Image: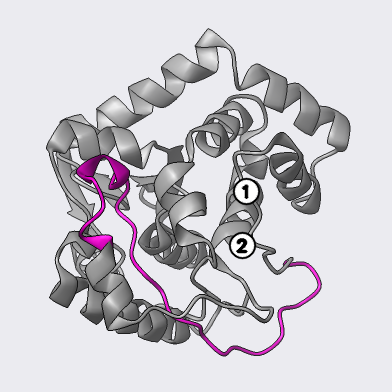
Amino acid sequence: MGPLPRTLELFYDVLSPYSWLGFEILCRYKNIWNIRLQLRPTLIAGIMKDSGNKPPAMLPRKAKYLTNDIQLLGQHIQVPIQFPKDFFSVILEKGSLSAMRFLTAVNLEQPEMLEKVSRELWMRVWSRVRAGLWEPTWETLQDLVTLPSAHFRLLLLPIPPLTLPPLPAECSPSQDEDITEPQNILAAAEKAGMSIEKARALLEKSSTPQVKNQLKETTDAACKYGAFGLPVTVAHLDGQTHMLFGSDRMELLAHLLGEKWMGPVPPAVSARL
């Protein structure tokens, strides 16, 4: 019998594009490395408030840099990220509370579906492949920092259009769907393979105190580990806890685990979404 798998916790929010990148990398490695991956749906707005952090878009130069950064990372990691057309409404105003409560309910009742449902929600927000994409300009980035600070509840980054091959049938291209709307959450769950009856039951459950408290507890746990944004990966190794922030710490994570890092798209995995 070999060594027991090491536990990794991934704290994420579907409004964070970097969370999606980290999520896909760890999902690719979960059957390659000797790990037990625990997906932890978390509310990024709660982490931002607790830590006092502010999104990078408040610094125009940093925001301008990040528009190119996320495009290149999407190509490199082979995740079809696109910037939502109506950024202010979809991201800065409406937030992710409904979606993250739903994912929390999924994790409680049907955890084997959590990976697929999470991915479908990301696809609906961050993977627009039709015409009319929002293209950030320097003037737009400057306008971002004039918004009231209350609008910057989320650690999110402006993302330019990205040209990728057509998606396979099992992945639905986003239509800039409002993931605060019940019908769009249900559509994501159904696309992921969940029965519509089960999805409706979980959507109803997502408004219960049990689910609300669980999401709060998960977010509080991330804060106690030291989170100031998302994604956060927590590795439990030999009685020690290591908190790694961001999607670009996977090579360091491999070092901590004593595992081989083969890049964001390991050869054993067909990674294209």
The magenta span reads: 144-171
Camera-side residue of 68 and 86: 86
Tell me if residue 45 comes above or below residue 118 in the rendering: above
Q: Residue at x 45, y 66 (%)?
A: 29
On screen, residue 20 above or below 149: below
- At x 52%, y 74%, the residue is 82
Measuring from the top left, give residue 203's x and y in whole percent. 69, 27
Closer to us: 102 or 224 = 102
Question: Picture coordinates of residue 98 (x, y %)?
Answer: 55, 33
> Residue at image x 28%, y 78%?
139
Q: Position of residue 48 (x, y in %)?
A: 23, 40
Q: Main secondary structure of the magenta part?
A: loop
**Rendered position, 144 above or below 133:** above
Q: Decide if residue 95 is in sight here.
A: no
User: Can see residue 208?
Assistant: yes
Instruction: Look at mark 2 in the image and give the residue it sits on.
Output: 123
| Disc 1/disc 2 C-alpha distance (Å) | 12 Å
For image coordinates 46% across by 60% down, the residue present is 87
User: Which residue is under mark 1?
Assistant: 178
Q: Position of residue 25 (x, y in %)?
A: 43, 67
The type of residue carrying mark 2 is Met
Q: Amino acid at mark 1?
A: Asp
Q: Nearer the viewer, residue 149 or 119?
A: 149
State yes or no: residue 109 in magenta: no
